[in-house]
Amino acid sequence: MSHSLQFFTPSRAPYLTLQKLPATSYTRFPVINFPIKKHSLTITKSSSSDLDAASPQVLDSGNGQTGAVGGLSADNVVVVPSHVPSDSGTAAGIDVDSVTEVELKENGFRSTRRTKLICTIGPATCGFEQLEALAVGGMNVARINMCHGTREWHKMVIERVRRLNVEKGFAVAIMMDTEGSEIHMGDLGGAASAKAEDGEIWTFSVRAFGTPRPERTINVNYDGFAEDVKVGDELLVDGGMVRFEVIEKIGPDVKCRCTDSGLLLPRANLTFWRDGSLVRERNAMLPTISSKDWLDIDFGIAEGVDFIAISFVKSAEVINHLKSYIAARSRGGDIAVIAKIESIDSLKNLEEIILASDGAMVARGDLGAQIPLEQVPSAQQRIVRVCRQLNKPVIVASQLLESMIEYPTPTRAEVADVSEAVRQRADALMLSGESAMGQYPDKALAVLRSVSVRIEKWWREAKRHEAMVLPDVGTSFADSISEEICISAAKMANNLEVDALFVYTKTGHMASLLSRCRPDCPIFAFTTTTSVRRRLNLQWGLIPFRLGFSDDMESNLNKTFSLLKARGMIKSGDLVIAVSDMLQSIQVMNVP
Ligand SMILES: Nc1ncnc2c1ncn2[C@@H]1O[C@H](COP(=O)(O)OP(=O)(O)OP(=O)(O)O)[C@@H](O)[C@H]1O
Ligand SMILES: CC(=O)C(=O)O
Ligand SMILES: [K+]
Ligand SMILES: [Mg+2]
């Protein structure tokens, strides 16, 4: 039996009066046998007699071929179709990977991880087996950083991730992160790192040094460097991991004395400070997207990456520009643009940047080099809150488990930091050096996973439903109805303690609106295309499936129930709330 509440917009049912009813009144209506057509609200009782496990159906992992949904980890839900030829194809059954099947049977939906995990891929993790280990460990998105490595190298990583998806049934999305045109060091002539000791004199220069690189020399990418710095300036590498004082300028060479020793990493970011403030002179005029970045973006479009993250965004304009560029060039314009918030300007223009973007990243590494470190936590909280309100996924990045680059266990402070990001209910957490070049990438991922699951559970048990006001973000009346439906459905799901929310969504929009509400139960998001499915992988609490579905909700539900039941992922009696973007309705039902 299902209880259904339906809203008809004028476009769907022009003969009906459109009327929005307060959410609290929905459940008071009695269940009746036939749809009432003369009012804007109908309550239907549906039968499940047409449930047919053998009917043609598609439930897919998102790679359009075969495979698992999500990852193989015990906290990640996975469904595998046995043979699904294409986005529009059909198949007669599904497979579920054994780890997930066991996990769902033992622990139910509630134990699934809601916070998504991103791993930066580097020399430590670019092998096929290493990538597979990360996917098994819960990696939802693989990030490639165009600051490092060649395009050939990145192409190889992308191909391996795609192969992993096709052959092993994952749906790992790919995020390409641009270099941006801030000032940074050269690549240290191929060395993995260089140690700078207190008191040593180093030369920073735009001159290209020969190989082998002369001792204590650093190439800088910014032509105006020697002109812009002054004797007495403080030069910070990677936001202060190593510090120098400028002592002399000789032509293009800038001599500096090391004042805080540390490890210099290839292409590390450089900032210079004068009288306690960041100096932003001519480099402030550099374009956000450099000519090299545009070539990398063309590469990303050609490779069909799922996300492009733009470094050092200053305004919404650049995001709009890039989005129209992508729309003109990629099929269906289905690459999401993520704004990296890592500069003072991006904080100044935060709301408009986030509104223009498809998501944002709290890039704490560079942000901490541009604002005082003690301001980074409040900036993070603000960015996470604004993203949530504007319904954009948000990633918390950098130094989450920095010590795990070298050590197999995190510090207590790192665990507290990860916990705080999960408590703030960020959509995703990101590993950088820990997975790119650290010694314990799998262990670092496992820490993110276990801390996420634990904090999420604690939050639910403590019944900490926040009273965050979610503003209306829709641009049309129909959008506003969708938002109200999702807010109401999420609230009903919490109050009725349902097992799962189901959302049928072609564009993914309704799924993201549900995710924004951060309900207690997981959200099974069914979508028709593989690219939407991969993109939903970034959003909090969504378990995305690809499913061939129609506009007939009853048949969609029956098809889904039979597919998921056949795999033991749901069982008779489970309480489910379903919404969809084809029919403005909320349905509450027990799985037959
Ligand atoms: N493709 C790669 N090849 C080699 N080393 C890499 C690669 N990707 C990352 N690394 C290493 O991992 C470290 C951390 O990676 P991360 O992506 O956070 O870069 P980053 O240099 O800190 O820049 P960003 O501000 O863009 O994040 C880098 O400093 C680099 O040493
Ligand atoms: C991720 C990134 O770019 C930063 O933290 O600076
Ligand atoms: K970058
Ligand atoms: Mg950065």
Image: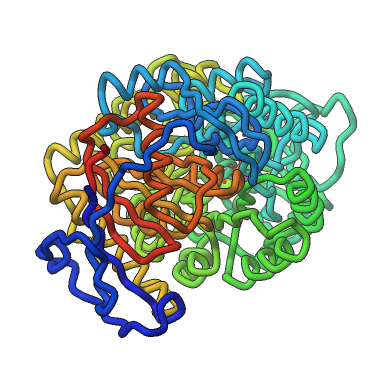
Residue 162 screen position, x and y as percent: 68, 31
Question: Is 7 left, or right, of 55 in this rendering?
Answer: left
Q: How is the image coloured?
A: rainbow
Q: Quadrant of ligand 3?
A: top right
Foreground: 25 or 150?
25
Of 55 and 500, the residue lying toward us: 55
Q: Dividing the picture into quarters, in which one does residue 452 lie? A: top left
Residue 425: image x %, image y %? 32, 47
Can the viewer see residue 193? no
Is 112 situated left or right of 444 in this image?
left
Residue at the extreme right: 210
| Position in image of residue 296 (x %, y %) | 77, 49
Residue 267 sits in quarter: top right
Which quarter of the rendered picture does the C terminus lie within?
Answer: top left
x then y, percent, for residue 408: 43, 14
Residue at x 76%, y 29% (from the top left corner)? 156
Which of 479/504 is in front?
A: 504
Residue ID at (70%, 68%): 324
Q: Nearer the viewer, residue 474 or 190?
A: 474
Residue 156, visible in the rendered structure: yes
